[in-house]
Amino acid sequence: MLMSSSDKAATLMYGPNAFRVVKPGHFVVCAMSGVPVPLEELRYWSVDRQEAYASAELSTRRALEDL
Protein backbone atom coordinates (compact mmCIF):
# COMPACT_ATOMS: atom_id res chain seq x y z
CA MET A 1 0.00 0.00 0.00
CA LEU A 2 1.28 3.46 -0.85
CA MET A 3 1.54 5.95 1.97
CA SER A 4 0.82 9.62 1.44
CA SER A 5 2.85 12.41 3.05
CA SER A 6 -0.05 12.93 5.49
CA ASP A 7 0.77 9.54 7.02
CA LYS A 8 4.36 10.51 7.83
CA ALA A 9 6.13 12.99 10.04
CA ALA A 10 7.81 15.88 8.24
CA THR A 11 11.43 16.85 8.78
CA LEU A 12 11.88 20.59 9.22
CA MET A 13 14.68 23.13 9.64
CA TYR A 14 13.57 25.74 12.17
CA GLY A 15 14.54 29.37 11.71
CA PRO A 16 13.82 32.39 13.93
CA ASN A 17 10.64 33.37 12.06
CA ALA A 18 9.71 30.36 9.96
CA PHE A 19 10.53 26.76 9.21
CA ARG A 20 11.60 25.03 6.01
CA VAL A 21 10.37 21.59 4.99
CA VAL A 22 13.32 19.25 4.39
CA LYS A 23 11.25 16.06 4.08
CA PRO A 24 7.53 16.34 3.28
CA GLY A 25 4.95 15.20 5.78
CA HIS A 26 1.77 16.38 7.43
CA PHE A 27 2.99 16.77 11.02
CA VAL A 28 5.98 16.96 13.38
CA VAL A 29 6.25 15.33 16.80
CA CYS A 30 6.39 17.53 19.90
CA ALA A 31 9.77 17.10 21.60
CA MET A 32 8.23 17.31 25.07
CA SER A 33 4.95 15.41 24.82
CA GLY A 34 5.40 13.18 21.78
CA VAL A 35 2.07 14.43 20.40
CA PRO A 36 1.83 14.91 16.61
CA VAL A 37 1.47 18.60 15.66
CA PRO A 38 0.00 19.31 12.21
CA LEU A 39 2.24 21.71 10.26
CA GLU A 40 -0.62 24.18 9.83
CA GLU A 41 -0.93 24.37 13.65
CA LEU A 42 2.81 24.54 14.43
CA ARG A 43 3.58 27.81 16.26
CA TYR A 44 6.32 26.92 18.77
CA TRP A 45 9.84 25.62 18.16
CA SER A 46 13.44 26.06 19.22
CA VAL A 47 15.95 27.23 16.64
CA ASP A 48 18.88 26.19 18.85
CA ARG A 49 17.55 22.71 19.60
CA GLN A 50 15.75 22.26 16.26
CA GLU A 51 12.71 20.92 18.14
CA ALA A 52 8.98 21.50 17.76
CA TYR A 53 6.52 21.95 20.65
CA ALA A 54 2.76 21.46 20.82
CA SER A 55 2.14 24.52 23.03
CA ALA A 56 3.68 27.65 24.51
CA GLU A 57 3.64 25.96 27.92
CA LEU A 58 5.71 23.02 26.68
CA SER A 59 8.11 25.34 24.86
CA THR A 60 8.63 27.40 28.02
CA ARG A 61 9.05 24.31 30.18
CA ARG A 62 11.77 23.02 27.83
CA ALA A 63 13.55 26.40 27.83
CA LEU A 64 13.55 26.45 31.64
CA GLU A 65 15.38 23.12 31.75
CA ASP A 66 18.57 25.00 30.80
CA LEU A 67 18.39 27.36 33.78
Image: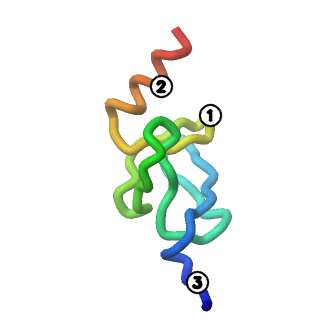
Mark 2 surroundings within 10 Å by alpha-carbon count, few (fewer than 14), some (14 through 19), many (20 or more): some
What amino acid is at disc 3? Met
> Pointer 1 and pointer 2: residues touching (CB < 8 Å)?
yes
Residue closer to the observer: 2 or 55:
2
Using the image, determine if residue 3 lies above or below residue 37: below
Q: Which residue is mark 1?
A: 49
The furthest residue to the top: 67
Q: State the separation of the CA atoms marked 2 and 3.
A: 33 Å
Q: Which of the image's four quarters has the N terminus?
A: bottom right
Identify the disc placed on residue 3. Answer: 3
Mark before the other along the chain sequence, 1 or 2: 1
Q: Which residue is mark 2?
A: 62
Scheme by which the image is coloured = rainbow
Using the image, determine if residue 55 lies above or below residue 29: above
Q: State the separation of the CA atoms marked 3 and 1.
A: 29 Å
The residue mark sitting in front, 1 or 2, is 2
